Amino acid sequence: MKRNSNLLRTLSALAVIALACVGLALHTGTGTPSAWGVFDVAALCPLGAVEAALASKTVVPPMLIALAVGVVLVVLFGRAFCAWGCPIPLLRRIFGLKEPKRTRRRSDALDLPASQRGGVADSRNWVLGGALLSTAVFGFPVFCLICPVGLTFATLIAVWRLFQFNEVALSLLVFPAILVLEVVVLRKWCSRFCPLGALLSLVARLNRTFRPVSNEAACLRSSKGEPCHQCAEVCPEGIDLHDASVSAPLNECTKCRACADACPMHAVTFPFLATRGDRDKAAGGTAEAGEDERVLE
């Protein structure tokens, strides 16, 4: 039976929302993805932590610890939050909106070499810079006002307070309106504008675990020369494990497993840490493939 991670990603995002609801109902103080907490241990959104430090012009040890926790999670799991925890893909699936594929962002009209993609030409990095600069200038985390992750949970909290305390607030209209604008109108928010995604991608350059590996001996395209491009066609981040010249770098991988689901030969796997044997299989023992693997880094 064909493997499918789409249901698992949906359940994972729903579990994150459910955990936030449990925290609201039982007053556990666990918080939301913007700031998770268990007793005195907290994990802030990495971008929120940086913005808070810039806004207050103060760095305190708990903030550094929270930021370090977030960085460690990204180094270990890469951009997995974007596929497995962020509510935006879930909202798109609920409203029947297709996930816009990040097709030509990797080179766009600039036709950049693969080694430069995801760098200065990435519009998300410019938005990230603008978010940090505006925070430093105005002394307030400006992006937090329009962050779709924060808006989702702020709307959830507003609805919760409406039913629990009969509290009617303007946020019941404003927050959902901004969220709909970002999800429905700005369809390429994640690939073009999201500064959180940009920051996660930059930190994910250090990620070496759970990265996709293609067994070239099993791959139809590599072993039999068949024109199979299913893994590349379904990847929302524009990653092609077989052609680095048109591929986004691997730090863009969200571990969504869409490529593994689509491969008819089950040649794509996500090992905890690729062994030398895995790399040899992926490289196919050729210098050209090995060079492609280095470019994808």
Image: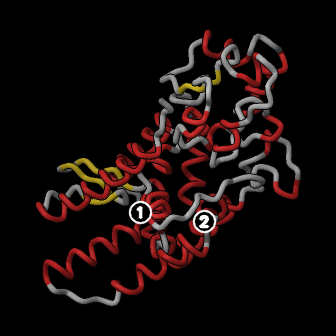
103 vs 113: above or below: below
Q: Is residue 191 left or right of residue 164?
A: right
Q: What element carries label 2?
A: helix
Nearest the eye: 92 or 288? 92
Nearer-N-terminus badge (1/2): 1
Residue 15 or residue 279, whichever sits in front: 15
Q: Nearer the viewer, residue 23 or 233?
A: 233
Which colour assignment does the render follow?
Answer: secondary structure
Compare residues 205 and 141 and report the one nearer the observer. 205
Q: Residue at x 58, y 68 (%)?
A: 131
> Which element is circle 1 on?
loop
- Say whether residue 161 is left or right of residue 113: left
Counting from the top left corner in percent of width and height, residue 201 is at: 59, 47
Q: Which amino acid does label 2 sit on?
A: Trp
Q: Mark 1 points at which residue?
A: 58
| Vertical order, 194 against 8 (above or below) | below
Q: How many labels does the image show?
A: 2
* Residue wearing tag 2: 189
